[in-house]
Amino acid sequence: MSGESLKVQLEWQGGKRIQVSARGNRIAVDQIYEDGREGMGFRPTELLLGALGACTMGTLLGFCENMKIPVESFSIEVEGKREKAPERVGEVRLSLVLSGDVPEERIETLRRVAKGCRVHYTMTHPPNIVLDLALNERVASKNKND
């Protein structure tokens, strides 16, 4: 793997519950159960949408700070539309609400900057995914294109 490496570890907790860890931080991931019960954590697709929203917000806040644009409040709602065949998130809509003394001539720049976060770029330029599966101590690498 070239460039800066990122690492996240996941551990099955039983049922459909998974613990995700990175740099000493933990978050619970769960799903809706067959009996309709809500899980005790985020769904994987909610984490995907949350990552996009957090990256977008961080990118815009950094830009506003650098450009001395005062921000009074900022919120983002991210909505994903489910698709089938294959099952995935087929469309994502970000609704940003930014309050502050934002010059009118900066609005289009803010839209452009918002699309420049790493997660947005990753989703629009998908990475090559390599899957290594260890089964009873045998390891097999599989490229997503294989």
Image (tube, rainbow, N blue to C red):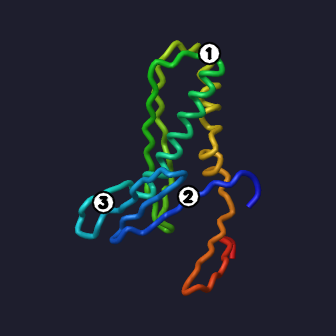
What amino acid type should be assigned to the residue bearing mark 1? Lys
Q: Which mark is residue 35?
A: none
Instruction: Residue 128 in the image: state x and y as whole percent.
Output: 69, 63
Decide: few, some or many residues near mark 1? Use Cα within 10 Å; few <14, some 14-19, many ≥20.
few
- Mark 2 or mark 3: which is in front? 2
Q: Which mark is residue 8?
A: 2
What amino acid type should be assigned to the residue bearing mark 2? Val
What amino acid type should be assigned to the residue bearing mark 3? Gly
Judging by the rendered image, the residue that carries numbered circle 1 is: 68
Quadrant in the picture for the C terminus: bottom right
Q: Is residue 4 left or right of residue 13?
A: right
Q: Is residue 80 left or right of residue 131?
A: left
Q: Residue at x 46, y 18 (%)?
A: 72
Instruction: Residue 70 in the image: state x and y as whole percent.
Output: 54, 15
Q: Is residue 128 left or right of residue 60?
A: right
Judging by the rendered image, the residue that carries numbered circle 3 is: 39
Q: Residue at x 42, y 61 (%)?
A: 19
